[in-house]
């Protein structure tokens, strides 16, 4: 056998020896991910946007033309994410309203992202450290697998994975990571130009899909340029060569990505326009304090993922000179300066830090930020925002494993086991914390109890956590506990009209009418157009006998909210009690235009006609009542009385008998109970 034959046979034997890990290693990534998030399949919908998005929103339920048109034209709850809605429409088609199926889809998306991180890490580590031997090849795959598993099972991923309303982060990341993988494939096609441009076109298309899943992925062009610098080294050896002839196509190929990013930024600004607050309203110094705090705290939670909460409340009033903000600024500036100083010796550190910053501050000029020059939402940070931003730390950990793999070669099995033990302990600890954090999102009650417990121990006590817990307790009928948390909420922010209104509802349910009235009045004082609070105040005044005051509040509520049908019904009822029958008739008729099947409205309108001796109209209304509810005994009795007044005694007797039969049946049912 000649030398070429010997080499070929050797490669064949080596290939047989090492081929097992090509499938086994990525399969292990999938297994670890699924195991860490397995409890999510027992979770339900939570009252933290899920109720609004799914339980009270029929528009996404299906994939026919009307549903798709809504998905691609809506900015529901201030979000434009049509492809994410498509996945929810698919969920509904498969699972109906069973939350298990929805959580299963989210888990599959996260698992797919973990696999993409594996292949992405493998490519980046290979570019930084070429695999020139089978041993180093398996080391690269193990390092990439560790990167993927650290990314996938970290507790900071929990919010994005198990909170169904945050699925847009999963889907956007799926396309975002896929676009990077395709881009890296295109850079590897040096000679095959057609294949290279095909991969590049696929990357552009996937980036567009990412934007249509959630516009916050606009940072991709900057990320790709960063990767071109290191580890791909496509822009030459230094800044002086970045704009040379060889780098021309590197810049040119980013144009379609930049155009898509601009479109995504404009979409994001447009749909978020009503919920964003200008940085001028917040102030530059507090804004910088928030940014530094966010950047530092995500890094801290990556290292010590304890005390995670669904809401880290932005204080209504805070001092940017307080120690959390000052320390955060010092940390961020120190890390940035240190990595710049070590740029030549350790470029991977600076590139990873820059990737982290770019993901967490995704704005170019006036584009949509997460932490940027405008404020979006009540949170100072949110775990879901770290979904992609923490990716480089996993890749760096994989690089460390790769160095360790080389060091361990030839040092014996026992040394390898001892060196691997800390890694195994860290992974098991992260999986345990993720398993536990996943169960926190099991239901609304457990979610907000955990949030209150965590945030009350933190520097920023969360009024939102107390408020949301109070809302859940109120709905469960635990009025005393709900009132306690509403009081805590108002102690942190007395100018919170919704908390005053809801505390008023709790007090009214406990028959504490004077206290309820005071809180409804305070809510109206804080927000004069708060129609719900005005209607609630009208209810209390009506119970207390101030019918004129109640009518005034109901009518003021209807001025700002004409569709507040309950308030209109109450106005009609009170006018009837005051014997203002003409106005009462008008209000009932207006109410019935929007609620034509309201049995109560038809009944009371009929009684008004009977009171005015307009028997024909009254009988017509009672006839409608009995068509809608044949077992309405009171309607039979009222109709019988009207017939008796008209001398129609036989017909009156029939209705009396029917009423007696209905009442007798109802009593028998009650006795059985």
Image (cartoon, helix red, strand yellow):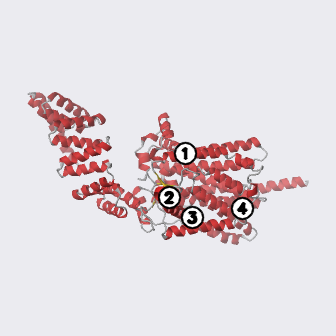
Q: Tell me residue 402's x, y (percent).
A: 70, 64
Q: Which residue is mark 4?
A: 139
What is the distance, in whole Å, between disc 2 and disc 4 at their CAs?
35 Å
Cβ atoms at labels 4 and 1 below 8 Å apart: no
Residue 368 visible in the shown view:
yes
In this rendering, the answer to whether 168 lies above or below 601 is below
Cβ atoms at labels 2 and 4 below 8 Å apart: no
Residue 104 badge: none
Q: Which residue is mark 2?
A: 382
Q: Which residue is mark 1?
A: 266
Q: Residue lying furthest right in this view?
A: 2
Q: Residues within 10 Å of mark 3 (few under 14, many from 20)?
A: some
Q: Secondary structure at mark 3?
A: helix
Q: Tell me residue 346's x, y (percent).
A: 70, 65
What is the distance, in whole Å, between disc 4 and disc 1 at their CAs?
44 Å
Q: Nearer the viewer, mark 1 or mark 3?
A: 1
Mark earlier in primary sequence (2, 4):
4
Q: Secondary structure at mark 1?
A: helix
Residue at the image position 57 percent from the left and 46 percent from the top:
264
Cβ atoms at labels 3 and 4 below 8 Å apart: no
Position of 390 with respect to 309 (left or right) is right
Mark earlier in primary sequence (1, 2):
1
Q: Residues within 10 Å of mark 4 (few under 14, many from 20)?
A: many
Residue at the image position 73 percent from the left and 65 percent from the top:
344
Q: Residues within 10 Å of mark 2 (few under 14, many from 20)?
A: many
Q: Which residue is mark 3?
A: 299
């Amino acid at each position: 056998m000649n030398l070429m034959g010997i080499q070929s046979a050797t490669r064949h034997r080596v290939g047989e020896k090492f081929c097992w890990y090509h499938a086994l290693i990525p399969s292990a990534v999938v297994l670890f991910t699924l195991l860490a998030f397995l409890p999510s399949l027992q979770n339900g919908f939570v009252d933290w946007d899920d109720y609004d998005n799914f339980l009270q929103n029929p528009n996404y339920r299906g994939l026919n033309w009307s549903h798709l048109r809504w998905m691609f034209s809506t900015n529901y709850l201030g979000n434009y994410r049509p492809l994410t809605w498509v996945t929810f429409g698919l969920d509904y088609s498969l699972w109906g309203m069973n939350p298990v199926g929805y959580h299963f889809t989210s888990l599959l998306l996260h698992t797919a992202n973990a696999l993409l991180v594996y292949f992405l890490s493998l490519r980046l580590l290979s570019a930084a450290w070429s695999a020139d031997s089978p041993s180093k090849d398996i080391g690269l795959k193990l390092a990439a697998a560790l990167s993927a598993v650290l990314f996938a099972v970290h507790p900071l991923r929990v919010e994005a994975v198990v909170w169904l309303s945050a699925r847009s982060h999963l889907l956007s990341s799926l396309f975002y990571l896929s676009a990077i993988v395709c881009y890296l494939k295109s850079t590897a096609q040096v000679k095959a130009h057609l294949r290279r441009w095909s991969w590049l076109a696929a990357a552009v298309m996937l980036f567009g899909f990412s934007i249509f899943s959630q516009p916050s992925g606009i940072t991709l062009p900057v990320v790709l340029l960063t990767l071109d610098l290191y580890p791909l080294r496509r822009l030459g050896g230094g800044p002086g060569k970045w704009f040379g002839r060889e780098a021309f196509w590197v810049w040119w190929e980013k144009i379609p990505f930049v155009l898509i990013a601009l479109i995504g930024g404009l979409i994001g600004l447009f749909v978020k326009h009503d919920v964003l607050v200008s940085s001028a309203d917040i102030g530059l110094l507090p804004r910088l304090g928030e940014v530094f705090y966010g950047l530092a705290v995500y890094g801290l939670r990556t290292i010590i993922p304890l005390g995670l909460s669904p809401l880290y409340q932005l204080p209504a009033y805070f001092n940017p000179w307080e120690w959390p903000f000052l320390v955060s600024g010092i940390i961020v500036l120190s890390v940035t300066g240190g990595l710049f100083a070590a740029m030549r010796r350790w470029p991977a550190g600076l590139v990873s830090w820059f990737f982290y910053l770019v993901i967490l501050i995704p704005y170019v000029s006036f584009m949509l930020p997460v932490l940027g020059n405008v404020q979006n939402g009540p949170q100072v940070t949110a775990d879901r925002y770290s979904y992609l931003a923490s990716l480089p730390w996993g890749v760096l950990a994989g690089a460390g494993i790769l160095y360790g793999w080389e060091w361990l070669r030839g040092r014996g099995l026992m040394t390898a086991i001892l060196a691997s033990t800390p890694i195994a302990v860290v992974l098991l600890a992260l999986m345990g914390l993720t398993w536990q954090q996943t169960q926190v999102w099991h239901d609304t009650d457990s979610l907000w109890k955990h949030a209150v417990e965590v945030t009350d121990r933190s520097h920023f006590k969360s009024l939102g956590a107390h408020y949301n817990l109070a809302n859940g307790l109120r709905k469960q009928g635990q009025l005393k506990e709900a009132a306690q948390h509403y009081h805590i909420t108002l102690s942190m922010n007395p100018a919170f009209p919704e908390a005053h209104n809801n505390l008023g509802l709790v007090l009214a349910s406990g028959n504490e009418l004077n206290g309820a009235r005071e809180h409804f009045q305070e809510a109206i004082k804080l927000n004069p157009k708060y129609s719900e609070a005005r209607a609630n105040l009208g209810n209390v005044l009506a119970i207390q006998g101030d019918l004129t005051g109640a009518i005034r509040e109901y009518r003021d509520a209807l001025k700002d909210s004409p569709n507040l049908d309950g308030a209109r019904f109450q106005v009609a009822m009170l006018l009837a009690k005051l014997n203002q029958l003409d106005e009462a008739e008008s209000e009932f008729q207006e109410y019935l235009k929007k609620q034509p099947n309201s049995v109560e409205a038809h009944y009371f309108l009929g009684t008004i006609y009977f009171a005015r001796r307009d028997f024909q109209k009254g009988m017509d209304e009672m006839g409608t009542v009995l068509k809608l509810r044949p077992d309405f005994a009171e309607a039979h009795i009222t109709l019988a009385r009207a017939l008796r007044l008209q001398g129609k005694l036989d017909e009156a007797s029939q209705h009396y008998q029917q009423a007696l039969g209905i009442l007798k049946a109802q009593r028998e049912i009650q006795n059985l109970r």
